[in-house]
Image (cartoon, coloured by chain):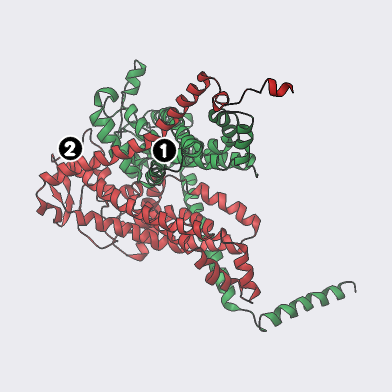
Chain colours: A red, B green
Amino acid sequence: MTASEHPPARISIRDLRGSPARRRRELAVRALFLSAASVSILVSGLIILSLVGQAWSFISQVDLVLLVERGWFPRRDLYGIQTIVAGTLMVAGIGMVVAAPLGLGAAIYLSEYASGRVRRTVKPILEILAGIPSVVLGYFALQIISPTVVDTVCPGATEGSNLMAAGIGVGILITPLIASVAEDAMYAVPRSLREASYGLGARKRTTSLRIVFPAAISGIVAALILGMSRGIGETMVVSIAAGATGGSLFTLNPCEPGQTMTAAMTALATGSDQVRGATLAFPSLFFVGLLLFAFTLGLNLIADRFVRRVRIAY
Amino acid sequence: MASTPRAQAMTGAEAVRRALQGGSTDWRSVVFQTLLVLLLVLTLGILAWLLAVVFVNGIPVLAERGTDFLTSPLASRPQLAGVGQAIVGSLYLMVFVALISFPLGIGAAVYLEEYARDSWFTRLINTIVRNLAGVPSIVYGLLGLAVFVVALADFTGGRSLMSGGLTMAILVLPIVIITSAEALRAVPGSIREAAFGVGATRWEVVRSHVLPYAAPGILTGTILSMARAFGETAPLILVGAVVGGFNVQYDSVVGTLQGRYTALPTAVYDWARKPPTYSGNVYAAIVVLIVVLLLVNALAIYLRNRFERRW
């Protein structure tokens, strides 16, 4: 009775919104977080702008014939790009020859064979070792790997620094990365697949190689691509161990000193207050940087695709 | 006597295994497994070799020079040169990283995970962040060179501590965003729904529920990104960390920020390219570098295991 005389006030959306001050605070906080997120767009914009701007000023000023000279001597106006691209691919390639078997072998063992205790101990150790700074590996490659390993592979050719030593150093650097990412991929393969395989009478080896490995192939390929991309972008190992600080002639012999895109950049910038030498040396840095950026971005995008395939599968 | 039935049981099990294996040991499996073990041992062995070389050569120098090595400035004679300036420089860089990339990175992660709807803008930021994390560090050096050293020279003082610090902060930003976003994603939705259910606003949910639960994960990520910045060399060479020697007395905060600087890994790089008389210094500096990094990494892993939470 009383209810019909005094109908309850209808609750409108306005009553649930809370005080205006509270709403204003919400909007302000949201705007704050949004601007923080937008910084990443700003950064990538800055990277591309600074690279492209200077690289363009290099390309538009340089005599294009100089780009295919058989050597990279920027302080003498010789910009044989193929020299440092070949050096980069050689170093990354040698790195992969070292790192792929080691990393994948370790990954298969840890994921499929190791007991839980071994896995729980070794995995963090690998992750910690993945954090060893690259300067350290560069010095190790120069002082230890070059006189021991490289000297036996190409006798007489070494005077300390060469592309092979740098490549092996890069390989050691990316092994833990490849092992860790590939192990994650294989460990994520559902147990039911393994059990089905055992149920059919397959051996552990067969199950690992024919069932788990193919099921995790996207993640494994992604691990290898990421390793390659790290190897291409690796700077300090090459700067220290590959020699050829001033510049380099075109070479395809890994036993000789050589230069990569990354080392070319540090060589130009080290030991001088400004980037000295020919006036084009400064913008040439950015041209090389743009090239490197494009290489690694391409590889990372491909790796990203592979990783996403793994996520969809299970 | 008592062992007889047991031995029989063993042979019984053995017999069953034999029968299932077709009567013979599968040598290929044995070889395969041995190969895998060898590869793992080789991987760990090489890295152990590296650490052994570093410590065997570095510890004696540290023992001989004592704290003198840790406090001496860069100098032209290896017997006098130390890592004092380098340690101070590295610490300053860490302050930049902590003050700039932590708030920005965690803020961006909160936006992406808690606020953003699935729009083209969100996907764009996500893609950009993922790819920024894969950009080689030296490209960040080029960014710092073009933007902080050259374009903003009046503000930063050119090849200065500030340029180096800002470059480092930008370098680790994507790592902070990615690790923080992962930590936020691990907080179950039911926690948020419970808070919304009692009338909390989004910010209140984030502040008093999501962030506290995600804090250990975020902390681990930020520690790891610090470690990354601590060991990073290449970008610093491009944005003008001093190699060689320098001797400046700073008179003010601005003077410090706009002044010359060097960092621990840069000192290693510089000495590594010098004559072999410096090799003791290199190894000793590497020991300092690696000990700091291993401690920091171990702390991060300890925190992760200590606070790891299963929902």
Q: Position of residue A81 (x, y in %)?
A: 19, 53
B68 above or below B136? above
Q: Which mark is residue B172?
A: 1
B145 above or below A177? above
Tell me what residue is drawn at x 66 percent, y 80 percent. Answer: B21
Tell me what residue is drawn at x 34 percent, y 23 percent. Answer: B257
Q: Position of residue B92 (x, y in %)?
A: 41, 27
Q: Is residue A129 left or right of residue A202?
A: left
Helix, strand or loop at mark 2: loop
Tell me what residue is drawn at x 33 percent, y 37 percent. Answer: A43
Single out the residue that lies furthest toward the top.
B251
Residue type, label 2: Arg
Q: Nearer the viewer, residue B288 or B111?
A: B111
In the picture, which quadrant includes the N terminus of chain A? top right
Residue A233 seen in this snapshot: yes
Q: Which mark is residue A276?
A: 2
In the picture, which quadrant includes the C terminus of chain A? bottom right
Single out the residue that lies furthest toward the right.
B1
Q: Position of residue B191 (x, y in %)?
A: 62, 37
Residue type, label 1: Val
Q: So how many labels did they put on this image?
A: 2
Q: Nearer the viewer, residue B102 or B193?
A: B193
